[in-house]
Image (cartoon, helix red, strand yellow):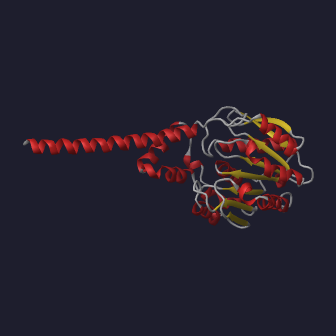
């Protein structure tokens, strides 16, 4: 082989090796990202959160309850005065304090509220953040807790979930008749779809590696499929709210879930809102819409 050909050969090998190395590191970076989401940094409750809760909710009870896999979750509970109780399910990288403004508006309207920290968040026990899979056990434990405090009030319990919490809420509510009204903020169609969307920059291989990582850690991605489950929530009322500027959960995604739902249902897309800034963008309109929805539908379902 001539020196010119050898040079060309090694140039091709070097370029090929460089591309493979770059691809490897990109996939590794994506895998690291998803591993970090399974072990999310705990967002602890601060003294300011506690002070805000006392100011906005008034007298509340510090409560705790246990999941079916023996984790203790901690919560704030305000019993209902004249209306039903709403359970709040927060999203990732967050805790129960994220719902204080809307919870306060519901308390002022006579509703009870139960705001709990999901596994691995706030003051609850450590646990994997499984993007709506194991968190279903958390919400079921919250509903069980309400039965111990309020009795079999299946017609008077609503659920409000955001993002991961919305996926959790959709899956549980579809099969649990104790939930009589459901509000989903920024819900994904499926966990598999979310992984594919957020891995797309790294290619199809990254999505499969992520699926493998989830499986190794006991996360069943096919157990989080709101698009396939939401139709079973009917004939109970559903409200979906999201922002048209949301790039984390694109409008086409939550529109697909809404299309799969059956009546009675309603969809409000807030102009200019991103992933969860509904109070900041829509203000009192958002609070009134949420309060009005639960006031109209809790404790009024016919048997």
| Image point (68%, 42%), residue name | 94
**Residue 280: which quarter of the image?**
bottom right
Q: Quadrant of the C terminus?
A: bottom right
Which residue is the extreme one toward the right?
A: 82
Q: Is residue 198 left or right of residue 265?
A: left
Pinpoint residue 43: horizontal percent, then vertical percent: 67, 37
| Image point (65%, 56%), residue name | 186
- Vertically, is 245 above or below 133? below
- Residue 78 visible in this rendered orientation of the protein: no
**Residue 145: which quarter of the image?**
top right
Pinpoint residue 200: horizontal percent, then vertical percent: 46, 52
Q: Is residue 115 left or right of residue 163?
A: right
Q: Nearer the viewer, residue 203 or 2?
A: 2
Pinpoint residue 149: horizontal percent, then vertical percent: 87, 41
Pinpoint residue 192: horizontal percent, then vertical percent: 53, 51
Q: Quadrant of the N terminus?
A: top left
| Image point (86%, 61%), residue name | 300
Q: Is residue 123 left or right of residue 296?
A: left
**Residue 287: which quarter of the image?**
bottom right
Q: Is residue 169 left or right of residue 104?
A: left
Q: Nearer the viewer, residue 225 or 23?
A: 23
- Residue 49 visible in this rendered orientation of the protein: yes
- Vertically, is 167 above or below 264? above
């Amino acid at each position: 082989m001539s020196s010119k050909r050898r040079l060309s050969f090694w140039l091709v090998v070097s370029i090929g090796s460089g591309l493979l190395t770059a691809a490897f590191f990109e996939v590794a970076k994506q895998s690291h990202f998803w591993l970090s989401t399974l072990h999310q940094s705990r967002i602890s409750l601060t003294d300011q959160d506690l002070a805000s809760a006392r100011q906005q909710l008034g007298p509340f009870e510090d409560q705790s309850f246990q999941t079916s896999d023996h984790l203790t979750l901690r919560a704030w509970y305000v019993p209902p005065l004249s209306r039903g109780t709403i359970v709040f399910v927060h999203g990732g990288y967050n805790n129960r304090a994220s719902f204080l403004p809307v919870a306060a508006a519901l308390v002022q309207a006579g509703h009870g509220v139960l705001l709990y920290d999901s596994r691995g968040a706030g003051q609850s026990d450590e646990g994997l953040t499984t993007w709506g899979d194991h968190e279903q056990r958390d919400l079921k434990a919250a509903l069980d807790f309400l039965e111990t405090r309020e009795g079999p009030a299946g017609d008077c319990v609503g659920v409000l979930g955001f993002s991961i919490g919305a996926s959790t809420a959709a899956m549980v509510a579809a099969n649990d008749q104790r939930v009589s009204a459901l509000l989903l903020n920024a819900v994904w169609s499926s966990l598999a779809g979310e992984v594919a969307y957020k891995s797309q920059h790294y290619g199809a291989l990254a999505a499969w590696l992520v699926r493998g990582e989830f499986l190794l850690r006991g996360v069943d991605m096919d157990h989080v499929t709101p698009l396939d489950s939401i139709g079973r929530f009917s004939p109970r009322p559903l409200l979906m709210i999201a922002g048209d500027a949301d790039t984390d959960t694109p409008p086409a995604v939550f529109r697909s879930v809404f299309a799969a739902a059956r009546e009675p249902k309603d969809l409000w897309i807030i102009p200019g809102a991103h992933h969860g800034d509904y109070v900041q963008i829509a203000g009192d309109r958002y609070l009134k819409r949420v309060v009005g929805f639960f006031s109209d539908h809790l404790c009024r379902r016919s048997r």
